[in-house]
Amino acid sequence: MDFKQIQSYSMSEWEATQRGEKPCILVGMGTCGMAAGAEDIIEALNEKLTQRSIQADIVRVGCIGLCYAEPLIEIVKPGKPSVLYGNLTPELISEIVKDYLVANNPRSDLALGTRGEGTLEGIPRLFDSPVLKPQVRISLRNCGNIDPENINHYIANSGYEGLAKALRMNPQEVIDEVKKSGLRGRGGAGFPTGVKWQFCHDAPGDVKYVICNADEGDPGAFMDRALLEGDPHAVLEGMLIGAYAIGATEGYIYIRAEYPLAIKRLKAALKQMEEYGLLGENIMDSGFNFHIKIKEGAGAFVCGEETALMASIEGSRGMPRSRPPFPVQSGLWGKPTNINNVETWSNVSAILQKGAEWYTSYGTEKSRGTKNFSLAGKVVRTGLIEVPMGITLREIVYDIGGGIAEDKALKAVQTGGPSGGFIPASLIDLPVDYESLAQAGSIMGSGGMVVLDEDTCMVDMTRFFLTFTQAESCGKCIPCRWGTKQMLDILEDITNGRGRPGDIELLQELAESVKDDSLCGLGQTAPNPVLTSIRYFRDEYEEHVKEKRCRAYVCKELISYYIDPDKCQACLICLRNCPAQAIIGGKNQIHVIDQDRCTKCGTCFEICPSRFSAVRVISGESVRETLPVKEKVLVRAKK
């Protein structure tokens, strides 16, 4: 069967499922959906459909990006726009089946929006909603729309047309098209993709490799995982195009073993590609041969660095090496090797499908196209988003994200994972592109974006991220091995009330040294949280060091709990629930907290009835000195 026959067959299957006589129900079955209870939703659907003798196709799809609303289903009824429902339970499924599938009432009170032609009264169009309207879905174009384990769904939605087009061009023409698109690597540094391909293409050698870097390890990042779970073929098609362009016949997907669902769907996709002649020998009768292997990583963050990644594939310990030579000259097993990450490869397949000029219509002059972000933290609508380069942080946080949870104030946005930096609320109108983020002291990174609110201690948050990078350092070079440890020691001293004059300056000096002298990207970027937090939040550091005060009441050694004698009603609730038995008092007596025994767990503060609000939390050395001491004040009788 040639490719045109495959397309015809795939389209027939797609039409039968999506536009047939039976309803089609799409169920979000990414990791986020499954964690929210999507399996229970499918079980409830099957049960209710059977009870009412309703014939319907249930299709398991990936994450559409609305992680805050999982579990999700989308119902496509013949001749009507599809309706998306979120935050579902088995009980709500029973109502939706009865009201919409039986009684034709789409339940506008439960619906999130509609897609497709036509409208339904009382239900807004999904892509007119604040969360989706600013987005442009290129990399994520099929996520949430197709069954990721059915290659026919991908092909029916223009899948592998980019590869077919590339195989009609010569390799240099393919590289030129990618150069013209302005695509930059989405894995961190943002190096021009076409230029990297050109270097690898021009490198001498009969054996060359392409690698997909799926070793996503940033805390709070899940872009690559969701993309591989929702549309693995978009990534695989991009790899095929890249391999043809540079002259490679073998490729690897390096993916962490903690992504079992993504691995399962990748394996299914590779098997189906082989069955259709889209992988292996003489692909599409072009004479082009290419094979892909999956390498599961053990979860070392440093293996996201390309030379460490290649060492791991070769069976060695994942440790970076000095460059030059660069991987495009001497990479895997000493052969020219091109490495791009998951999102980059999925953009490649879209660019070859629709053309470089189409792609350059999005983004900015130096940062073309779109970027995926995992929007996490203290924001109302968390999830996976794809936005044009140049969009502002304000649009992401407030329009797409719905603002700060619990109506609190924005403090900062952390971009680029633990290797990125903190961008303060004062820069909320900063455009999101490579140059603007770098100027602010941060990086684009792979796409982690964590929103921090007013209750965040920036010194403690810096300590958290440095704890991660210090633990993940491979230890090969001294600046990273010892420098990150020394920085972490200073941060722990500061957050534990042992900060001394000069610590802030020493911390900044160390950070600059580690940044300049480390061997690989992990060490070179690990100081970013330190440098940006000192740059924008130095006053918090000074409060910690000079006043022993944490304004966010996060650093335990800098806070104390006490009971306001004018508000204590001697209800005994705090006394009975204190795990350290640090509260002194009795019936009809005002309580006092024994500061020597208090572990600062906060239980008393949390359980004190709101009508009393007698337990207070304070911070600052001078303030704590005024607290009652058990030897001086025990209890006094209430009148």
Image: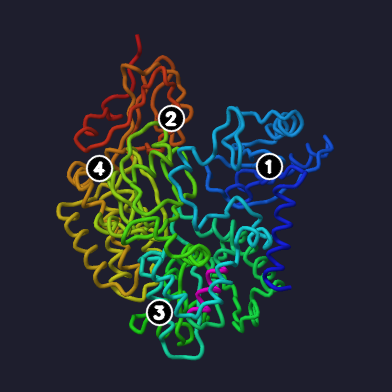
Amino acid type at image mark 4: Ser
Query: How far apart are labels 3 and 2 at the CA level?
Result: 60 Å
* Crowd class of label 2 (few under 14; some 14 to 19; many from 20; radius 10 Å): few
Q: Which residues are magenta?
A: 236-245
Report if the CB atoms under discs 4 and 2 are less than 8 Å apart. no
Main secondary structure of the magenta stretch:
helix
Query: How far apart are labels 4 and 2 at the CA level?
Result: 32 Å
Q: Give how far across and how far down residue 448 sits, in percent.
A: 42, 54
Task: Please report whichever mark, 3 or 2, sits nearer to the chain's N-terminal start.
Answer: 3
Query: What residue is pinned by disc 4?
Result: 426
Magenta span includes 480: no
Query: What residue is pinned by disc 2?
Result: 606
Q: Give how far across and how far down residue 24 sits, in percent.
A: 72, 45
Q: Which mark is residue 76?
A: 1
Residue 407 position (above or below residue 46): above
Query: What residue is pinned by disc 3?
Result: 198
